[in-house]
């Protein structure tokens, strides 16, 4: 009996230790999960709220009627009589600005509490209210007999002490939008709020008229956190009760579920917005997973909206452009950002577009251009290029990786044009042709403009040369003209049909440019004729550059009889005839100066 009691005591002690250990581990894990979940969610939701405040503040500052605001500020004086203050607040300009502020608040009236404008003064700690979105409504309620204290109305010209608002003072000083980095407790509504400020500029984009302030409460954030906290507390209590009565197996099983959920929460906090908790049970852990999943859906929805906005920006500012500026999104771009890189530039242009466009209405012009561009634009991206800009019917594209990509894209564009012209013929429209110029050189990619209107741009002599080269396609008759420098950089030039055409000096450049033609997409008969006459054409050029004009002209005429539609032969025949008449200019080296823009 005594031995049995000792065995019973040992059994009781081990069970107690196991139960106590499981209880302590369960309590610790639950507490850590709750704290980490709270902190991760709190940071994520606060960051999201900051972003919403910042976006709404920046958009709101751009929507304020600067003309009406400027006229209101003209009435701003150190002291205003009640009659003068009332006259301003009854003015059309005041109502226009007040209505604009209320429209900003109406974007999310449940969360946006205050929207107001204040103007800086000579005292860095003192500003003056210009327009508060609540003023007209409060005055109307007081006129209807409701008792409203003057201290509750931020009327025109009243002082707004910003000495305890360092973010507001920084916005005034730096003239850039900012959002406070922490919550502020709002005594009026008994909630926390986040305040954003954005300068409002005059139409010149440089004169700061006032600062727009916007307060957004954390009702959604607090609601999610409160629900999560309550549920977490329930789970902790349940875990402790289960730990006391369930032994190691059930405790271990419960712990594994908690840890799994904690990992999901952590992954979500690391911006894996697709992750969801796998809910297998209907107990407290399952409820927490369900609550988390609901919260995750809400956050992902807001994130998707922001991504959609950034994608819309991306259709105006190429992502490749941002990548080379080392920017994650268009929101990170600042005026003056720049980088230098060697790239291949491609210019294309529809020939005789001016005459063609004169036969169409504006709507038909846009439909035609969009139909054409929608076919050739994807070919540029297919060969690792990106479109820097559209210039009417012209395209400027950049190829960062290799010159071969630009050549392949140009040939693919001509192939698509061939298909498009077949469609135009079947629809009763005349076919079109394009000219393409390609050159490689060092480029400066950056932002130009001013703070209220910037544009991504590329500045380089290589860009101007490429544009001139595209214009020369009209003179030489080829569809694709490439500089000798680019031909030399190609890795698979032997796989293309190309030939040297001329040495020229284009408008705005002193250096000589070697022009080559890529004619893979010429009609088969023309392509074969050019290939068959390439050796003889180079021999004729050698005679021409050696000043043996008579021999050169005979050679060019003989080539024209073999290939009568080759326009370059007529060009050299005309040049030979001119030189025979005028003689060789002093210092003549065979370089042709072309002034075509």
Image (cartoon, grey):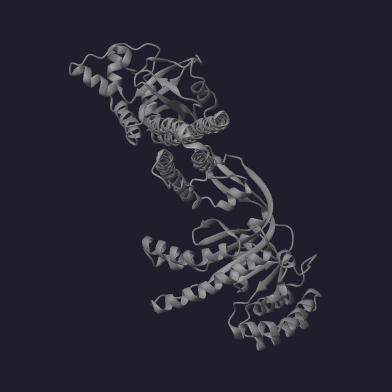
Looking at the rendered image, the quarter that the N terminus falls into is top right
From this view, report whether residue 32 is shown above or below residue 81.
below
Viewer-closest of 480 and 198: 198
State the residue at coordinates (27%, 17%). 86
Viewer-closest of 441 and 102: 102
Side of 398 where 189 appears, left or right: left
Viewer-closest of 12 and 343: 12
Query: Where residue 559 sits: x, y (%)?
Result: 69, 85
Side of 97 where 496 appears, left or right: right
Looking at the rendered image, the quarter that the C terminus falls into is bottom right
From this view, report whether residue 307 is shown above or below residue 192.
below
Q: Is residue 26 visible?
A: yes
Query: Where residue 284 sits: x, y (%)?
Result: 41, 38
State the residue at coordinates (30%, 15%). 84
Q: Residue furthest front?
A: 1
Query: Where residue 287 sits: x, y (%)?
Result: 40, 40
State the residue at coordinates (44%, 68%). 356
């Amino acid at each position: 009996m005594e031995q049995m009691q000792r065995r019973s005591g040992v059994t009781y002690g081990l069970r107690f230790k196991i139960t106590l250990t499981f209880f302590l581990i369960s309590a610790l894990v639950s507490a850590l999960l709750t704290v980490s979940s709270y902190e991760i969610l709190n940071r994520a939701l606060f960051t999201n709220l900051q972003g919403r405040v910042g976006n709404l503040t920046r958009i709101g500052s751009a929507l304020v009627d600067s003309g009406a605001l400027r006229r209101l500020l003209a009435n701003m004086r150190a002291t205003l009589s009640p009659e003068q203050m009332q006259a301003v607040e009854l003015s059309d300009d005041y109502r226009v600005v007040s209505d604009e502020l209320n429209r900003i608040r109406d974007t999310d009236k449940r969360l946006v509490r205050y929207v107001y404008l204040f103007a800086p003064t000579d005292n860095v700690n003192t500003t003056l209210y210009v327009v508060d979105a609540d003023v007209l409504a409060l005055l109307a309620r007081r006129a209807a007999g409701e008792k409203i204290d003057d201290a509750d109305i931020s009327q025109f010209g009243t002082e707004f002490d910003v000495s305890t608002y360092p973010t507001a003072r920084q916005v005034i000083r730096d003239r850039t939008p900012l959002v406070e980095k922490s919550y502020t407790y709002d005594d009026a509504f008994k909630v926390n709020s986040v305040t954003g400020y954005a300068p409002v500029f005059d139409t010149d984009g440089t004169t700061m008229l006032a600062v727009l302030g916007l307060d957004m409460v954390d009702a959604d954030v607090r609601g999610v956190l409160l629900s999560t906290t309550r549920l977490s507390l329930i789970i902790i209590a349940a875990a402790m009760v289960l730990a006391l009565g369930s032994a190691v197996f059930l405790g271990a099983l419960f712990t594994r579920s908690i840890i799994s959920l904690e990992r999901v929460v952590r992954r979500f906090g690391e911006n894996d917005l697709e992750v969801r908790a796998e809910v297998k049970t209907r107990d407290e852990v399952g409820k927490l997973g369900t609550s988390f999943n609901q919260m995750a859906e809400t956050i992902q929805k807001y994130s998707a909206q922001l991504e959609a906005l950034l994608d819309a920006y991306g259709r105006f500012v190429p992502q490749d452009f941002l990548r080379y500026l080392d920017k994650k999104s268009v929101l990170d771009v600042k005026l003056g950002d720049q980088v230098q890189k060697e790239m291949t530039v491609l210019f294309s242009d529809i020939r005789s577009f001016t005459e063609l466009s004169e036969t169409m209405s504006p709507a038909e012009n846009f439909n035609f251009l969009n139909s054409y561009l929608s076919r050739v634009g994807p070919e540029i991206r297919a060969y690792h290029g990106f479109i820097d800009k559209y210039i009417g019917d012209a395209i400027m594209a950049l190829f960062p990786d290799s010159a071969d990509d630009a050549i392949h894209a140009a040939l693919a564009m001509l192939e698509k044009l061939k298909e498009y012209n077949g469609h135009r013929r079947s629809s009763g429209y005349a076919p079109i042709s394009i000219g393409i110029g390609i050159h490689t050189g060092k480029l400066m990619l950056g932002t130009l403009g001013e703070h209220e209107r910037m544009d991504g741009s590329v500045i380089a002599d290589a860009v101007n040369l490429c544009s001139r080269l595209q214009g020369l396609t009209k003179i030489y008759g080829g569809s694709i003209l490439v500089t000798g420098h680019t031909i030399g950089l190609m890795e698979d030039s032997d796989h293309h049909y190309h030939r040297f055409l001329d040495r020229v000096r284009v408008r705005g450049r002193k250096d000589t440019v070697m022009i080559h033609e890529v004619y893979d997409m010429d009609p088969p008969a023309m392509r074969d004729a050019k290939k068959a006459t390439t050796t003889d054409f180079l021999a004729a050029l050698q005679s021409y550059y050696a000043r043996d004009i008579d021999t050169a002209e005979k050679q060019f005429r003989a080539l024209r009889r073999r290939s009568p539609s080759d326009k370059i032969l007529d060009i050299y025949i005309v040049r030979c005839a001119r030189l025979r008449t005028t003689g060789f200019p002093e210092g003549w080296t065979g370089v042709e100066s072309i002034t075509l823009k």
